[in-house]
């Protein structure tokens, strides 16, 4: 069963930008696309742990600011590479607020 937590107003995250959310289970990067879709991923690029929240959002992907690795916001898969994956977390918008699935965040802390 999902338990959703309210983490921010959608308007507090710039379009084609991100916000770093610090939870008791660790830091998560929450991204907003140009079409107002939201995605949540671990904030570390699998290459050299680059801070993805500081990356450039384009379409449904983010480019790591350190070495230009491109990561799918939908799947967490590194594009154009055979290996590399970033954990993703369910996110949704409700009444102009961004919500994250708390159960998945808690699972992350245990894993």
Image (cartoon, rainbow, N blue to C red):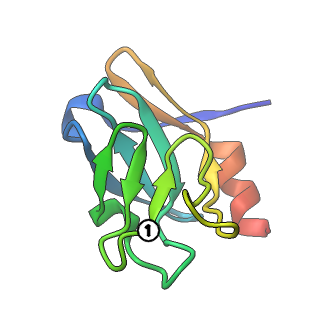
Q: Residue at x 53, y 54 (%)?
A: 41
Residue lying at the far top in this picture: please name it.
95
Q: In this orientation, which residue lies closer to the viewer: 69 or 33?
A: 69
- The image shows residue 93, relative to residue 6, as above or below, that is above
Give residue 32's quadrant in the image.
top left
Q: Residue at x 30, y 62 (%)?
A: 55
Q: Between 3 and 111, which is closer to the camera in this rendering?
A: 111
Residue at position x 62%, y 55% in the image: 77
Count of numbered badges drawn on the protein? 1
Give the quarter of the figure containing the N terminus: top right
Q: Is residue 63 above or below residue 84?
A: above
Residue 25 point in image, percent of width and height: 59, 64
Query: Which class describes the residues within 10 Å of circle 1: few (<14), some (14-19), or many (20+)?
Result: many
Quadrant in which residue 82 is drawn: bottom right
Q: Which residue is mark 1?
A: 69
Quarter of the image for the C terminus: give it: bottom right
User: Tag 1's secondary structure?
Assistant: loop
At x 65%, y 69%, the residue is: 84
Q: Nearer the viewer, residue 35 or 97?
A: 35
Q: Position of residue 71 (x, y in %)?
A: 49, 56
Decide: is 17 above or below 63.
above
- Find residue 108 and report its horizontal and vertical position in percent: 70, 61
Q: Residue furthest bottom?
A: 48
**Residue 58 pos. (x, y %):** 31, 44
């Amino acid at each position: 069963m999902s338990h959703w937590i309210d983490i921010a107003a959608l308007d507090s995250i710039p379009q084609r930008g991100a916000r770093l959310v610090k939870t008791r289970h660790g830091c998560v990067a929450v991204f907003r696309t140009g079409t107002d879709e939201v995605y949540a991923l671990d904030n570390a690029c699998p290459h050299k742990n680059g801070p993805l929240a500081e990356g450039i959002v384009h379409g449904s992907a983010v480019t790591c600011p350190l070495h230009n690795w491109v990561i799918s916001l939908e799947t967490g898969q590194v594009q154009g590479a055979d290996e590399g994956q970033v954990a993703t977390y369910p996110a949704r918008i409700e009444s102009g607020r961004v919500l994250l699935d708390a159960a998945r965040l808690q699972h992350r802390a245990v894993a």
